[in-house]
Image: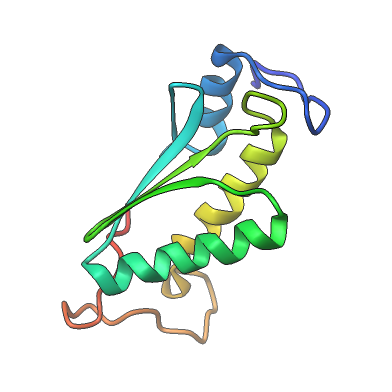
Amino acid sequence: MAQWRKKTADETYAPEEIEARLKEELPNWYYEDGWIRRKYKTSGWKGTLMVVNTVGHLSEAAFHHPDLTVSYAFVIVKLMNHAAKGVTDKDFQLARKIEEVVMWRPAKEQDSALEGTPDDPRFKYIKYD
């Protein structure tokens, strides 16, 4: 059962509400220093750039922009609504969309005609949870 109540688009959540909501909706994300965060591990620079470009596209389409930490084999996404000075529904919604797209595995979907990335190190670009 949800331990938080739905808020208006720019209304911030208290830390305990954020943690409860992350646990329920985005278990691979965590709350730290006023931001909701997720570290995506990649297989190297090519995969890192693919994640960065995906996050960039989704963020621009949403017109809500995260802070990113980019390294050779990982990307950390940090979301907080700067105007509201806290975490809002905008952050949760964008985090869900980023998670859905970056971690998409077509081969895991029922009746998918798409095979997904071959199980071969030459083609791996992201480390799935």
Of all residues shown, which one is farthest toward the front?
83
**Drawn side of residue 124 relative to residue 91, left or right:** left
Which residue is at 63% across, 39% downward? 91
Image: 105 above or below 25: below
Q: Quadrant of residue 72?
A: bottom left
Q: How is the image coloured?
A: rainbow
Between 91 and 19, the residue placed more toward the observer is 91
**Drawn side of residue 87 relative to residue 118, left or right:** right
Between 109 and 87, the residue placed more toward the observer is 87
Image: 16 above or below 69: above
Instruction: Please provide percent x and percent y for residue 90.
Output: 70, 40
The N terminus is located in which quarter? Answer: top right
Instruction: Please provide percent x and percent y for residue 13.
Output: 66, 19
Between 117 and 33, the residue placed more toward the observer is 33
Between 71 and 117, the residue placed more toward the observer is 71
Which residue is at 48% across, 68% downward? 53
Total residue callouts: 0
Of all residues shown, which one is farthest toward the bottom?
113
Of all residues shown, which one is farthest toward the left?
121
Instruction: Please provide percent x and percent y for residue 2.
Output: 65, 21
Image: 82 above or below 85: below
**Drawn side of residue 75 relative to residue 100, left or right:** left
Which residue is at 65% across, 60% downward? 60
Which residue is at 28% across, 54% downward? 74
Q: Quadrant of residue 50?
A: bottom left
